[in-house]
Amino acid sequence: MEALGLAVLVGLVALGQGQPIDPHAPPFCPPLAPRDCHDVHAGGSRSDGVHLIYPGGRDGAPVPVYCDMSTEGHVWTVFQKRFNGSVSFFRGWNDYRRGFGRADGEYWLGLQTLHLLTLQAPYELRVELEDFENNSAAATYGSFALSPRAVSAEEDGYSLHVAGFRDGGAGQPWGRTHTYGVGPTLVGWDV
Ligand SMILES: *[C@@H]1O[C@H](CO)[C@@H](O)[C@H](O)[C@H]1NC(C)=O
Ligand SMILES: *[C@@H]1O[C@H](CO)[C@@H](O)[C@H](O)[C@H]1NC(C)=O
């Protein structure tokens, strides 16, 4: 496997947070089946770490995910985390579809889970990089979705829809490379 020169954290933040509270809204009730880390936070959890989410709704399977609740005042649903090279990211399509690794270590959440997540709310994407000298950089994309309009996401190849690049010191946007699809793209970020 390749030498890992960077720690990589890739996550989503739900848009529409921080809006003024509607006085006529029904009383707050934490979701029983949190769809993402934002829901986990709304349910009272305040610490970074692994939580169960239900991206397919309360009848879907629970998925363990790493929640970052301390970066830039947002709650990030992390879908790729790499920091010490203990998990190989050179894998086949089925592993990228289903996910691999563990949310308490290095992992990839999986294309199908990501697709379900991005279907149910608009998300912003954040990529954080840190090298061995502790220099860090981030890049943000204002919108991110996988096959948002496809009848079958799998047949559509989980095609990546990203827009609204904002540089946080990480340099150029993915540009050309994002046509390769989300798995190879995110993995390809640090090769
Ligand atoms: C990498 O980190 C994981 C989780 O903290 C740990 O279990 C594992 O032993 C580490 N592996 C290496 C090669 O440092
Ligand atoms: C990077 O940060 C870690 C943890 O804060 C520290 O242990 C390490 O010495 C730092 N490395 C460098 C090269 O500054």
Image (tube, rainbow, N blue to C red):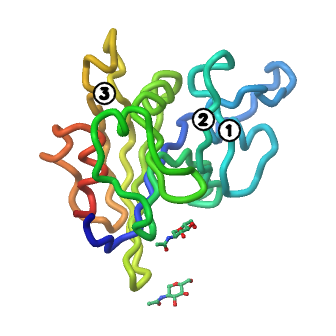
Q: Name the secondary structure under disc 2.
A: strand
Residue 128 on image: x %, y %: 42, 61
Mark 3 closeness class: few <14, some 14–19, many ≥20 residues within 10 Å: many
* Residue at image mark 2: 63
Mark 1 closeness class: few <14, some 14–19, many ≥20 residues within 10 Å: some
Q: In which quarter of the image is the C terminus?
A: bottom left
Q: Which of 155 and 16 is in front in this view?
A: 155
Q: Name the secondary structure under disc 1.
A: strand
Q: On residue 78, which mark appears?
A: none
Say if mark 1 contacts mark 2, CB within 8 Å: yes
Q: Distance between the residues labelled 1 and 2?
A: 5 Å
Q: How far apart are marks 3 and 1 (CA)?
A: 23 Å
The amino acid type found where label 2 is placed reads: Val
Q: Which residue is depicted at the point 78% across and 47% down?
A: 45
* Residue at image mark 3: 158
Mark 2 closeness class: few <14, some 14–19, many ≥20 residues within 10 Å: some
Q: Which residue is depicted at the point 34% across and 33% down?
A: 94
The amino acid type found where label 1 is placed reads: Leu
The amino acid type found where label 3 is placed reads: Tyr
Q: Residue furthest left?
A: 176
Q: Distance between the residues labelled 2 and 3?
A: 19 Å
Q: Give the tally of numbered discs.
A: 3
Using residue 190 as the reference point, say whether residue 129 is left or right of it. right
Residue 124 on image: x %, y %: 44, 41
Relative to residue 150, is residue 7 depicted above or below? below
The image quadrant that residue 32 belongs to is top right
Residue 151 on image: x %, y %: 33, 9
Residue 19 on image: x %, y %: 65, 36
Q: On residue 52, which mark appears?
A: 1
Relative to residue 188, is residue 24 depicted above or below? above
Relative to residue 3, is residue 14 depicted above or below? above
